[in-house]
Image (tube, rainbow, N blue to C red):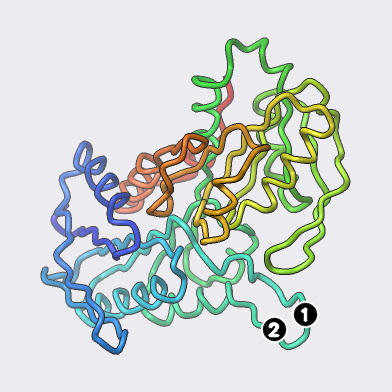
Amino acid sequence: MENVLVFSGRSNKNLTQKICKKLKQFEEIELGGNVEIKNFPSGEIYCQYQDNIRGKDVFIVQSTNNPNQDWMELFILIQSARLASASKIIVVIPYFSYSRQDRKNKPRTPISAKLMLDLLEKAGTTRIITLDIHNIAIQGFSSIPFDSLLPCNLLIDYFKKNLLVNKRDLKKWIIFSPDVGGVKKIEKYADVLGTDFGMIHKKRIDATNVEQKTLIGNVKNKSVLLIDDMSESLNTLSGAAKLLKSKGAKQVVSFVTHLPLTNDGLKNLEKEQYIDLILTTNSVDGIPNNKKIKQIDISNILSEAISRTMNNKSISSLFEIKGF
């Protein structure tokens, strides 16, 4: 398709290259990449598309794990494409930061998730595709099409191939959420796999510390699949794993879709002793090379979403969770 171009911001070029490689297998599209992006000495971001994008559908892939730099770069890429007369501008944001700021939890505070969506639309975005956003209700803030894909089938496939001996082995597993907010999500997993599920009550003390004392569910002599959408410091996951082990869990395998670890998170990873395995995706670049971490590639699901979008096909099948 000569009227489609895919471009990458600087945040996760490795993932964009994988997406484009997958797209080449089933789409005759012109793959972009010729966009100059640089910082002036002052820190200001500059970009210029080297390709002619007039009248074309432009896909821009950019994660936002370095929030202020990555978001500003994305806004500039979008506006540049609009001013260059692109027909459509679809942004693919594998990791959507600021999504936890989805409500006013205290007086005189922002709703930053809404602000990001307003800025995306104002810059010229015509559609948003992301992965496992923190709160799906954020879609209600957007007046343009917004799809948040689910990594469920990727995790279930890995789980079946690498962690299960056979289907009967499922009775030895239980699925857990490290907080109340993730219960709806793990209930879907439990329904598909036919396992029990439980949750941990979490009380946040401050930005980096949480208190976890209450566990709902029986984990004695069970293997636990602990599922969350993201972790920066590992504090919530590690605290949950510690509590689960204290209640008799045999092993704790954590699946966290996004792992944009901070410096504190990297330090916590080195001394982590309660989580046996951390499964995550390559939604952010720079995942540390650690024996406890296994990455699951998301380029397949994103390339399929892009292909279906460019061909005006439904992507509803990408939301169907498949069991055995």
* Between 318 and 260, the one nearer to me in the picture: 260
Q: Residue at x 17, y 59 (%)?
A: 32
The part of the image, by quadrant, that contains residue 51 is bottom left
Q: Tags 1 and 2 in contact by the CB under 8 Å rule?
A: yes
Q: CA distance from mark 1 to mark 2?
A: 6 Å
| Left or right of 181 on screen, residue 220 | right
- The amino acid type, in three-letter code, at marker 2 is Thr
Q: Quadrant of the C terminus?
A: top right
**Secondary structure of the residue carrying numbered label 2:** loop
Residue 253 pos. (x, y %): 62, 33
Tell me: 133 left or right of 78.
right
Q: Which mark is residue 106?
A: 1
The picture places residue 69, in percent across and down from the top left corner, at 39, 75
Which residue corresponds to mark 2? 109
Identify the amino acid type marked 1: Lys
Residue at left offset 62%, top offset 51% = 234
Q: Residue at x 32, y 49 (%)?
A: 15
**Crowd rating for badge 1 (residues with CA inside 10 Å; few <14, some 14–19, many 20+):** few
